Amino acid sequence: MINRITQSLSLLLSFRGKKPYFPGEKQVFLFTKRPILYYDFTPKNVKDAINELQLILQEKGFLKNVTGEFDLDTEEAVKEFQIKNHLYVDGIVGALTWACLFYPKLYSGVRDLLPEEQNAIKELQIILKKEEFLKKEPNGIFDYHTEKAVKRFQRVYGLKDDGVVGAATWAVLLGMRQKIHTTSTKFLFLLPLEVLFLWNQLLIIASITLGIYHSPLPGNALRLNQAEVLATAYGLTCIVPFLIDFLPPLKYYDRNALPLFRYAPYVLTGIFWKPIINFFGNLFN
């Protein structure tokens, strides 16, 4: 019993600690042992990328000498750049560091823009218009319509919808993402993420409640009042993810192709609410 408590506490503390999700040695393996590949990729491309990296670090005042080799001075310069730009400090030039090196942070309300910032805004607007997030023609001005389009893009791709185009948003804009079905989200991305989350939770509870009220199983006569039904449905929302993981028919169905069926596991949970509760009751007793 004491060992179980100790293991639980250590597991809980490890989740709350500041341990990085991707330690430096794993990132090294990912980005060096398995580089990004494309047609006509040669070792010369790597050499050119190192030279380009050193030139831009030198231009920004982080590196003195351009050697053509990713040496210790270059690594230290990369780390200093990452510290200044609030990136994970590991000395590895990944997608976020590249985006931060080449693209400035953009947001509305900034005046006296530099030419490179105006060009970046125009490129941003071209991408947003191509992806159908922006209706107006690109003009190089970060106006209200551009900020609104950025927020829509961020909501669709799970980014913080603050309208600020930083390294993470640039990386996703430039291709670090999977193609989405815009027809299924063109109405939903107008809403804040908090509203979408609340709406999803309400649909989940409603689906479980529907299953509880209309359970066809024998011996499942409902003897709960409305408050008890809602409390039971809310408690059962914690169980459904485990059912989806352990039941193959629920685990492998395509939720994007059949959006209405994404709540089917919750209805089934409501139908089997009594056996489920009895099972967990016996398990803990």
Image (cartoon, helix red, strand yellow):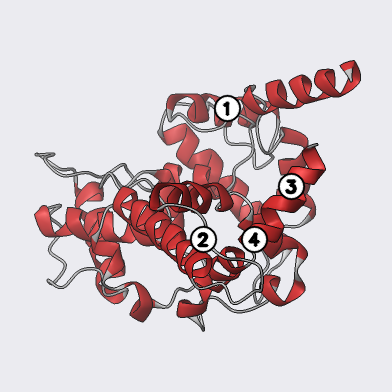
Q: Is residue 153 visible?
A: yes
Q: Which residue is mark 3?
A: 280
Quadrant in which residue 4 is drawn: top right
Element type at marker 2?
loop
Picture layout, residue 86 above or below residue 263: above
Along the line of sight, which residue is nearer the eye, 265 or 167?
A: 265
Image quadrant where one finds the C terminus: top right
Q: Which residue is mark 1?
A: 79
Residue 13: percent from left, percent from top: 69, 20
Marks 4/3: CA–CA distance: 58 Å
Picture layout, residue 186 above or below residue 69: below
Q: Which residue is mark 4?
A: 45
Q: Which residue is mark 2?
A: 176
Residue type (three-letter) at the residue carrying disc 4: Asn
Residue 25: percent from left, percent from top: 77, 36
Image quadrant where one finds the N terminus: top right
